[in-house]
Every structure is written in C-alpha cells, then in structure tokens.
Image (cartoon, grey):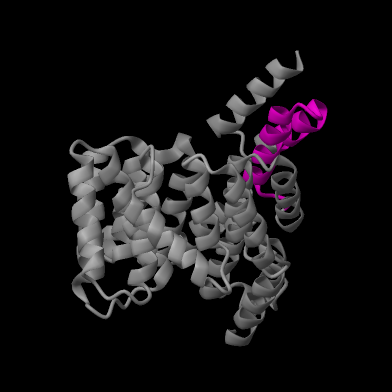
Amino acid sequence: MDTELKDSEREYKLSKDALAAYENLGNLRATLSNNEEIKFWRAWYASEAGLLDEAETIYEDLILRNPENVWSYNALGYLLAKNDYERLAKAVELLERAVEISEEPATIHSLGYALHKSGDLEAAEVHYIKAVELLTANQELSADDETAQEIFGSYGRILLSLPDRDSNFERLLTYLRNKRQDDPWRSAYNEVLFLQAFYKNRPSEEIVEHFSKLSENSSNSSRPVIIYALMLQRMGDQQDATILLNRAGNYIDEESSNDALDFYAFALNEVGMMAEAEDVLRTLITREPNNPWFYGRLGYLLAKEGVDIEEALEHLQKALELAPGRPEFQSFYAWALHESG
C-alpha cells in the first residue's frame, strides 16, 4: 500500500496531473482500492483535479465506513466550504463534527473558514484565534509549513476585515516578527506581509524593502519575485514590474506546481500581460481539464480582451458545466454575453 501511494505521489509531483494520480489509485487491485487510506488520497486527488462530485462521494463513503475518522469530515467540509456556496450549512455541520472528534489546528481552522464564508465573522475569528493558539503552543511548530501559512493567512484576512483592523493586524505582525524566522514561521510571516500589502492602497516601505530583498535573494522560487512585481505595479512602476515578471518566468517550467502557475497567471493579468496570462491558463487547463476555475478565468480574460468572444463563451460554459453552483461563473458568463451583444 505504501508503495502504491508513493508511486502516485511521485507521479503527481512529476506531472502535476492530479487526474492521473486519481485514476492511478482507482486502478489498484481490489483489495487496495478499498483501503481507507487509498480512498482518502484518491478523493484528495479528485478534488485537486476539479472532480468535486467524485471527491464528495468518496469522502461520504469513508465517513460511513468510519464515523470517527476526523480527517474525512475535515476534508469534505473544507471542500464544500471552498467550492460550493450553496452547501455552506452542510460544510459547517461536517466541520463541527470534525472538531468534536479532535480539536486540531487544521480542523478548527477549517470550521472557522466555513463560518467566514457563511458571513459569521465573529465566530470565524474565535476559531481562527484558537487555531493559532494551538498551532503556536509548541515552539517547534509540529504542523507542516502549508498548514501554518494557511492558518495565519486566514487569521490575517479576517483581522483586515474587522473594525480596528490596522491595530489588530499589527499585533499579528509583531507576534510573527518575534518568532523564529526560519521555516515555517518565515513562510507565515511572508504570507501575512503579502496580505497587508494587498489590503492597503499602497504597501509600506518596510514591506516593499522586505520583498525587494527576498526577490534579490531568490534563486529557485518565483513567488517572492512575483510578489515584489505586484507591489511595484501597485506603486505605478509598470516597467520594472513587467521586467520582474519576465524574470519570474525563468523559474516557471514543466515541473512547477499548479499553484505556482496559477499565481503567476494572476500576476500577469494584474500587470496587463494578457497574452502571457492566457498561455499559462491554457497550460493549467491541459494539466487539469476538469478544473472549472481555469476555464472560468481564461473565459473572463478572453472576453475582457475582446479578441475571441465565442471562445470566451465556450470556456465559461465549460466552467458552469463543471461547477453550476458558482455565482462567479454565472456573473462572468452574463458579462461575456453582454459583451457579445
């Protein structure tokens, strides 16, 4: 079983093809394909590939098999909260059960996230604070890097949306500054600084200098370079922002993760490099042909450019076919129809 999972993980990392990893796990011998761990990861790969209904079906089956498996509740609840506005109540119910089984930083954060999406900011803040407290109780920080970054990022977002946001947010920044500056604290600190820069009209000199240094010292990651480029663009320096994004492109290749490509496409669009953003989104669609978000964003971009409104409508129709409940895609499609006359 471990070998099969490792083979799928290796294939996913090499190809960035979640659909292939999902199918690989589904083709295992019958005895293994019914294994709970195999099924859980198959559901995760399905969600990464945009096969949300399939992921939900597998998670539901896992919950029926083992009603005390906290991670199945957590994974399904978070998936619904992230991808389906129409079933937030179900997401909250599943995540409340996950927290009831085990109060982990990840489960408490997921419940806070669902409450946040539901519009209950007060309850969401309470859960985010508790997740942060549990996460930081161990000075060595046993949680992985991505968990820390996501929890601090969510906490930062809600602080910036509440009254007295600046003073509250500064307390969070001070806390992170005083922590160890190596991973994963460094990653969480950078994420929060990035949030602050984009919730303000202009990033502060401190933040600009911070990401300028990160960009200069970056030898194998595109993210610091992209963030610095976006800051320069926000400050009106279009020329240098474009130069930096071209430089960031040197770090983007066939082995780059979909998250890295997605962020790069977002930045290219923000800076006005539409043709380049279009190319990256087409690459993402090739990698994940069932991910509605890539179709939606490409369709919106094409409609915005006004180059091929028919193709734009096709991509937006595909997004709606894959995720009919998403209001963003309905809005994009209506706007594209208006543009088409």
- Residue 128 at x, y percent in the picture: 26, 53
**For the N terminus, which image quadrant?**
bottom right
Q: Dividing the picture into quarters, in which one does residue 206 lie?
A: bottom left
Q: Which one is nearer the viewer's eye here, 104 or 152? A: 152
Q: Is residue 301 magenta?
A: yes
Name which residue lies at 33% across and 42% down. 116
280 left or right, relative to 32: right
38 left or right, relative to 129: right
Q: Which one is nearer the viewer's eye here, 44 or 296? A: 296
146 left or right, relative to 336: left
- Residue 214 at x, y percent in the picture: 46, 66
Q: Is residue 291 magenta?
A: yes
- Residue 313 at x, y percent in the picture: 75, 29
162 left or right, relative to 320: left
Name which residue lies at 70% across and 40% down. 274
Q: Is residue 252 above or below residue 288?
A: below
Name which residue lies at 18% across and 39% down. 164
Which residue lies most toward the top here? 341
- Residue 27 at x, y percent in the picture: 73, 72
Residue 60 visible in the picture: yes
- Image: magenta residue range: 289-318
Instruction: Tell me which secondary structure the magenta stretch mostly adopts.
Output: helix
Q: Is residue 321 above or below residue 170?
A: above
Q: Dividing the picture into quarters, in which one does residue 132 lie?
A: bottom left
